[in-house]
């Protein structure tokens, strides 16, 4: 979570915004063993959401985990969910099935997406 915190830290400082840690936003563990061909394996997890690599978390399990966080935010509140790219991709995939491996691969660090009240996603560009 340190990398994630460092991404949001300037915003928190500038706007004196409170932070809530939620372990459900941790990146998923693909495998409990090292994987030489991890990119190929990761791509497979976007094709088959039930695909499990040695004791790892499936895409479906990770997607359900981040959806719990999303659904726990009251409808009338604005919130930022700050997390790693893979699990964020799975949240975006829930709302747009076209968001998959290639879109994950094209993410920049950091990247910002908005999900509006009608569950439409939009890539947000920040002008410096």
Image: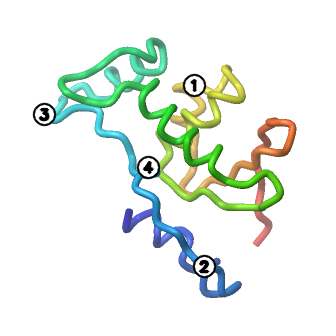
Residue 27 is situated, as x and y percent measured from the top left of the image, at 39, 46
Gap in angstroms between the C-alphas marked 3 and 2: 36 Å
> Residue 100 has which mark?
1
Please state which of the two labelled residues, at mark 4 or mark 3, is closer to the viewer. Answer: 4
Residue 95 is situated, as x and y percent measured from the top left of the image, at 71, 29
> Residue 18 has which mark?
2
Residue denoted by label 4 = 24
Asked if labels 4 and 1 touch by Cβ distance under 8 angstroms, the answer is no
Q: Sequence order check: which comes first, mark 1 or mark 4? A: 4
Q: Sequence order check: which comes first, mark 2 or mark 4? A: 2
Q: Could you say which is closer to the camera, residue 70 or residue 39?
A: 70
Q: Residue at x 44, y 49 (%)?
A: 24
Gap in angstroms between the C-alphas marked 2 and 1: 32 Å
In the displayed structure, 95 sits above or below 123; it is: above
Gap in angstroms between the C-alphas marked 1 and 4: 21 Å
Residue 86 is situated, as x and y percent measured from the top left of the image, at 47, 39
Asked if labels 4 and 2 touch by Cβ distance under 8 angstroms, the answer is no
Gap in angstroms between the C-alphas marked 4 and 3: 21 Å
Q: Sequence order check: which comes first, mark 4 or mark 3? A: 4
Q: Residue at x 52, y 69 (%)?
A: 20
How many neighbours does mark 4 have within 10 angstroms: few (below 14), some (14-19), or many (20 or more)?
some
């Amino acid at each position: 979570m340190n990398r994630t915190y460092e991404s949001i830290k300037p915003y928190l400082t500038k706007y004196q915004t409170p932070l809530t840690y939620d372990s459900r936003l941790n990146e998923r563990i693909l495998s409990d063993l090292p994987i030489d061909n991890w990119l190929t394996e990761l791509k497979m997890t976007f094709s088959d959401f039930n695909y499990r690599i040695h004791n790892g978390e499936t895409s479906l399990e990770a997607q359900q985990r981040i959806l719990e966080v999303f659904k726990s935010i009251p409808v009338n509140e604005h919130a930022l969910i700050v997390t790693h790219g893979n699990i964020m991709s799975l949240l975006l995939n829930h709302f747009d099935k076209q968001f998959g491996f290639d879109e994950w691969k094209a993410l920049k660090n950091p990247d910002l997406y908005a999900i509006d009240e009608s569950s439409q996603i939009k890539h947000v560009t920040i002008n410096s």
